[in-house]
Amino acid sequence: MCLLYPEEKIQFCLEYESNVDCKTCEPNFYKKAPKECAPVIKIPDCKTYDGFVESECLNCENDFYLENGSCKPRTVSKNISNCAENAIDRDACERCANGFETNSEGSLCLLAISNCKEYFKTTTEISCSICEDTYFLNSNKCILGAIDDCQRYESETRCSTCGQGSYLSSTVCNKHTLSKFL
């Protein structure tokens, strides 16, 4: 025998948990009780609400950010050149466009340092602290190393980690040689 699903339609219910309970309410409504969806209390400039709380904003409209439950107008981050993604919870840039890196506050997108893996950041500048594998750091630049099979450098002339099939001998990499045993 087939049963109606849901048993009784719950107004503004988007998805049912059982044939009598609502799991998810429609946008701009929250789950007040298992069988009731109620309208959220609107927060100015809120784009997305929690869905389980009467008035909790999760995400604000584009020119606003979320702070202490309300949407505040962006003043700094809306004018940051090369910002690819603004932070949800502060007036800052979360991620810059390719080739750029945020400063410590997310208030600037500065030109990235080629082949830099990790940065040291201040409010006004960035500097490279660790280069990508096979590069060494020299005057805030990552330069391709010349030691055969070196993966990580301490300096231009000192290797700290060798690639697969090699071993570190003093500051250089030597290839493993295979010996045949009878």
Image (cartoon, rainbow, N blue to C red):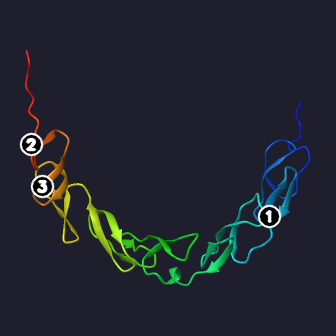
- Res 47 → quadrant: bottom right
Pick whichever, 43 or 120, lies toward us.
Answer: 120
Report x, y in % for residue 81: 43, 81
Instruction: Report how far apart the C-alphas of labels 1 and 3 lie in the structure.
Output: 61 Å
Left or right side of 79 for 151:
left
Q: Which mark is residue 158?
A: 3
Dot 2 falls on a residue whose secondary structure is strand
Report x, y in % for residue 96: 43, 71
Is 145 above or below relative to 176?
A: below
For the residues bearing labels 1 and 2, Cβ distance under 8 angstroms: no
Report x, y in % for residue 28: 77, 66
Q: Which mark is residue 54?
A: 1
Q: Residue at x 14, y 48 (%)?
A: 149
Instruction: Report how far apart the C-alphas of labels 1 and 2 lie in the structure.
Output: 66 Å
- Tell me the residue that label 2 is attached to: 174
Pick whichever, 122 or 22, lies toward us.
Answer: 122
